[in-house]
Amino acid sequence: MKNILPYIEANKDRFLQELFDLLRIPSISANPVNKEDMVKAATFIKNKLLDAGAGRAEVCTTKGHPVVFAEKIIDPSLPTLLVYGHYDVQPPEPLELWTTPPFEPQIRDGKIFARGADDDKGQMFMHVKAFEFMMADGLLPCNVKFMLEGEEEMGSPSLGDFCKENKEMLKCDIILVSDTGMIAPDIPSVTVGLRGLSFVEVEVTGPNRDLHSGHYGGAVANPANVLAKMIASLTDENNHVTVPGFYDDVVEISKEERNEMAKAPFNIEDYKKELDIADVLGETGYSTPERASIRPTLDVNGIWGGYIGEGAKTVLPSKASAKISMRLVPNQKSEKIAALFGKHFLSIAPKSVKVKVTYLHGGESFVAPTDTIGYKAASMAYEASFGKKPIPIRGGGSIPIIALFEEVLGVKSIMMGFGLESDAIHSPNENYPLFNFFKGIETIPWFYKYFAELTKR
């Protein structure tokens, strides 16, 4: 691996230019307007994989957005690694909060600013460039396959069927994912757990039209007021979710494991300063890192209704709506939680309004052991490039397809993320440090090397 750093240095400008070309494509999976952009992004990635040395690469159609599949089989008797990532991105709104346009990537303060810079185009593209290096230097030690999808940000609705229909094509020994983060630029970590997700939309309807607030205010239920009260009742004074049965299946983490988690570096004052908040808030009895990783949550992701334009318009809105996500922990099931939520939300609605609850999508939580070959190879890879062993952590986010991979393909995943909390994923001014991008390209080939060696033993 002595040539990896010289190779990165010689090609870093090209790497960035290619990544910028990808970041300029507004591959927003949730917006039908961007359907052609999804195909454009998939085709771009396919071509880059072929340029890097893939023996086969294609854009595969699904019921939704396409999947990019590629492979390089050097010897069928060797282990096979499957790289998973996604090229779709979150909607960039609110646009006015971006310092520079979200699909015009720029470098500022040593960071790449663009939608998808971290999540997940930047992290996914590290794997393409690491593969390119191994092929150029003749160092690929095992077979490799790529499965890069375009629906992760909307719950991967088509990928389950794609995996079931292509089990033989996707056959592998381990799945490698870079769609998570690390504790700090100098503190690598391996994500060994992810929370699940249950995502719903609620709609509260009152009168058959918007009403004059002077003529009807105080006499007719205001859906916006009702919705606000209903949402407020979903958590209590201890920030405990009040949906009956919500905690029934929650696996409580042992004191010993919580003590181990507490060893990870965390400064509450730095945390508050980074977010520009006076204090934190969360479930009583748990630390901030615990609240964001091992505990289930319920949060409003968006709320709307009535007039929100400039100036005043005195109306009682006919409807008010909200999107609500629930992050889940081991043993909680997304569809069960959605059903419990729906039943409860309907039960607390006053007779003066009609309520509709729609389950949009979900996924299950994931926990991986730290005694597997995959984890050991990842630990050795980080130690080779960073000079220190990584810390195992549980992430607070969700990658719904990870649990499905184990169910359908029967294969464990290893999550080697290089993002940082400060990268503002899903937010305006998303960014990805240049250091992390290039460090990922440096580290990934070491994983291939050690995984191949440990598998042979």
Image (cartoon, rainbow, N blue to C red):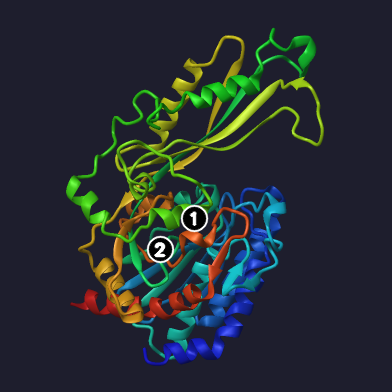
Q: At label 2, which amino acid type do we have?
A: Leu
Name the disc covering residue 273, or none: 1
* Image location of residue 44, percent across then percent down: 62, 71
Density class for disc 2 (Cα within 10 Å; few <14, some 14-19, many ≥20) is: many
Nearer to us in this view, 401 or 173: 401
SS label for mark 2: loop
Q: Specify whether residue 244 is in view.
A: yes
Q: Residue at x 51, y 48 (%)?
A: 277
Question: In the picture shown, does residue 264 fall above or below 77?
Answer: above
Eye-nearest disc, 1 or 2: 1
Nearer to us in this view, 333 or 388: 388
Quarter of the picture containing the C terminus is bottom left
Question: In the picture shown, does residue 128 fall above or below 151?
Answer: below
* Image location of residue 358, percent across then percent down: 55, 30
Q: Quadrant of residue 381?
A: bottom left
Instruction: State left or right for residue 149 relative to residue 209.
Output: left
Q: Residue at x 19, y 46 (%)?
A: 255
Instruction: State left or right for residue 413 relative to residue 253.
Output: right
Q: At label 1, which amino acid type do we have?
A: Lys
Instruction: State left or right for residue 41 relative to residue 298.
Output: right
* Image location of residue 453, percent across then percent down: 25, 80
Q: How far apart are the two marked residues, 1 and 2, measured between alpha carbons?
A: 44 Å
* Image location of residue 178, percent across then percent down: 43, 65
Name the disc covering residue 170, or none: 2
So how many labels did they put on this image?
A: 2
Density class for disc 1 (Cα within 10 Å; few <14, some 14-19, many ≥20) is: few
Q: Quadrant of residue 385?
A: bottom left
Q: Specify whether residue 119 is in view.
A: no
SS label for mark 1: helix
Q: Earlier in the sequence, mark 1 or mark 2?
A: 2
